[in-house]
Amino acid sequence: MTLDSDIIIGGMFPLSLYVNVPDLHYRTKPNAFSCTGFDFRAFRWLQTMIFTIEEINREPNILPSITLGYKVYDTCDMYALRAAMSLLSDVGDEVQNSTCNGAASVQAIIGEAGSLQSSIIASSTGPFQVPIVSYFSTCTCLSERRKYPACFRTAPSDYFQAKALAQLVRHFGWTWIGALANDDDYGRFGTQQFIKQVTEFGIYNPDKISQIVAVIKRSSAKVIVVFSPEREMLQLVQEIARQNVTGIQWLASEAWITGAVLYTEQFLPYLEGAIGFSFRRAEIPGLREFLLGVKPSPHEGSSYTNVFWEELFACKLKLPENTTEGSYTRARLCTGSESLEGIDTIYSDTSQLRVSYNVYKGVYAIAHALNRLSLCESGKGPFINNSCASIHNFKPWQLLHYLKEVRFTDQFGGEIGFDENGDAIASYDMINCQRGTSGKVKYVQVGRFDSFAIPGQELSLDEHSIVWTGGKTQPPQSACSESCLPGMRKAPRSGEPLCCFDCVPCADGEITNETDSAECKKCSSDDWSNDERINCIPREVEYLSFEDATGITLSVIALVGACLTVAVIAIFFRHRNTPIIKANNSELSFLLLSSLVMCFLCSMTFIGRPSFWSCALRHTAFAIIFVLCVSCILAKTVVVLMAFRATLPNSNVMKWFGAAQQRTVIFFCTSVQAGICVMWLVKFPPFPMKNTTYQNTKIILECNVGSVPAFYSVLAYISILSCICFVLAFLARKLPDKYNEAKFITFSMLIFFAVWIAFIPAYVSSPGKYTVAVEIFAILSSSFGLLLCIFTPKCFIILLRPEKNTKRMLMNKC
């Protein structure tokens, strides 16, 4: 379609709806690409351009002495570059036998709709510096100024659309999103802005579309964003309907969110609730009347109007050649007087003028640039030597200079201008496709996105107005994995996105009271996790107390042992002048019995809540008192041996081991142990500690020995003295006199060794408070062993066989 005038503006619109690709099997020459169908929406865009040019020509304040004309091509997607070259060369489609003079036939171009097509023609026409103003190309790639120096657009870049979609996804908590992309610049760059990794499904063809829908059916993603032109989306939704895929929440790019051809009665059940961002809309006064005033014409310059008329009314304006009206019955003839008023089509629907508004703004931007060029004053121009360009004879690059500086506010309050990359000011309406009362689709604005708003507040929503997929009022949930409940944490799956995870219960001693927690928090050392792993509860504190049954039992046994020992002391004291007491060294016996009393009583220091003083006392008192006991027994054993040595002729042994020497031995042996204990207490004393490692749910209060070498030193010293005592007693066990108690000492040492050897594995394997109980039991057992083995025979004679408690009886040989 053409209109000659002073200045010609080129137009490029995809009027053909489908491209028929021939079979490329490389065995024969392929047929040419053919275009079929008619896009009524694109024809409205074309008519909007013509309407705007005519409106500017009537405007007295813009280009008053200049009229604008137009030359428009159908790009049919495949022929965008051919159309651009035709606009620049002014030789039409045939270039044979033609001479190119280097001058473009148009001073600026409005087009193209597709991002891929725009990038091709912008890179090809860039060297000619002919301004191209796209009304529907949103690919971020077109912002590369070095590559596309003459490319402008009234549609915002997909950078902002992807940002708006990302904020929408984050707002509703969708973590698992499907992404479909047309295999072109628009699809690739759009999804790359939306997500880091994009699934590219390739060119739309029946086999590939079927595979896409199969993937959608298998996927757990219930929210899918689609960056695709309207015609390719139409093929996809046809397959969606064929396989009856429902329950998908579609997030639409601006390319198809208001594409009325998609929201037919057949497809609306599958697309109802679709949400997307579209360009700002406007109601252009007079445009609807202009659109309805279109009539077919016999002029060749109006051929697109005639095709539109035939497609709309399903008729023919003239019969094909070599046919008669009677023989041609496949279609009726058009009268040319059919009315557009009563037909509801996307062409005449001016309620959603968004892309049409972009066309309107693009034409006005070129007109304002031309107006500024025409108003340039000589000597004040922007070119060499401050020269100006003539409105009647200027170069495209001169118009390009003024177009870069265009900025004005149109009659609808919209600010029109371009940034340094040729991009428009980004502002979107958030559109929700809903089913109206009549059953047809209605586009409801449910939010806005303004790139110039405060960061983080660019998106504003009216959630109560949104209708979701399937007519629901609540937003769908879309996640690769179900949310992890409190008490569980997310465990990422190897090789899968971060939003795909398994829910793993928190380990013992860890909790989380949040949903979808990435990590579990450890409870403090005094707490433990409950069974649900959502709260930390105080651990049960365990120690051997005097209120515990085991503690009471051991306390009673210790007191009984101490009382029995005191009773033995009383018996010995009352019968201290009898031969049996005198024969067994009464002084050592009383000292041994006193130390046994302390042994029984010191076991009770192991019972009760450990403290610094109780821990220090229980270990050192046990060590010193036991050494005192063993030292007394050692002295007794040595006295027995020395006594028999003294019976030999001329023996003077006993004077070297009298009472004073015995006391010295006992004092020395005990002092060595006391010295070790003093150094132990000064350097690394025992201290109370909380054992939280042995049992998870309990805190075991126990005494840490502090210095392990010191602890083992005192035990080793007791063992050495016990072994010496045992060896000496064993050597003296068969001495003939009845007052010989070496065999009783030997037996008591055997019991002592048996108890403490058995104590080691029992101590290691006993849990919690029973560890201390085993230690107390070992002390009491060895103390009872010494008491019973050494003093029971003497008490038996004193109390039950007093007739044997005479010097004569004791002097008899065995």
Image (cartoon, rainbow, N blue to C red):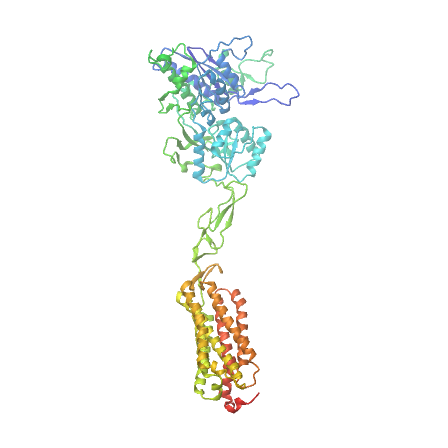
The quadrant of the rendering that contains the C terminus is bottom right
- Of 637 and 604, the residue lying toward us: 637
Asked whether residue 559 is in view, the answer is no
Q: Is 329 situated left or right of 279 in this image?
A: right
Q: Is 48 situated left or right of 761 in this image?
A: left
- Of 429 and 367, the residue lying toward us: 367
Q: Where 460 sits versus 660, above or below? A: above
The residue under the point 60% across, 30% down is 207
Q: Position of residue 332 (x, y in %)?
A: 55, 17
- Of 651 and 171, the residue lying toward us: 651
The residue under the point 44% across, 77% down is 664
Asked whether residue 135 is in view, the answer is yes
Q: Where 775 sits versus 588, above or below? A: above
In the rendered image, which quarter is residue 659 located in? bottom left
- Of 235 and 564, the residue lying toward us: 564
Q: Residue furthest right?
A: 27
Q: Position of residue 644 (x, y in %)?
A: 53, 84
Q: Position of residue 219 (x, y in %)?
A: 55, 39
Q: Position of residue 669 (x, y in %)?
A: 46, 73
Q: Where 161 sits versus 793, above or below? A: above
Q: Number of numbered discs present?
A: 0
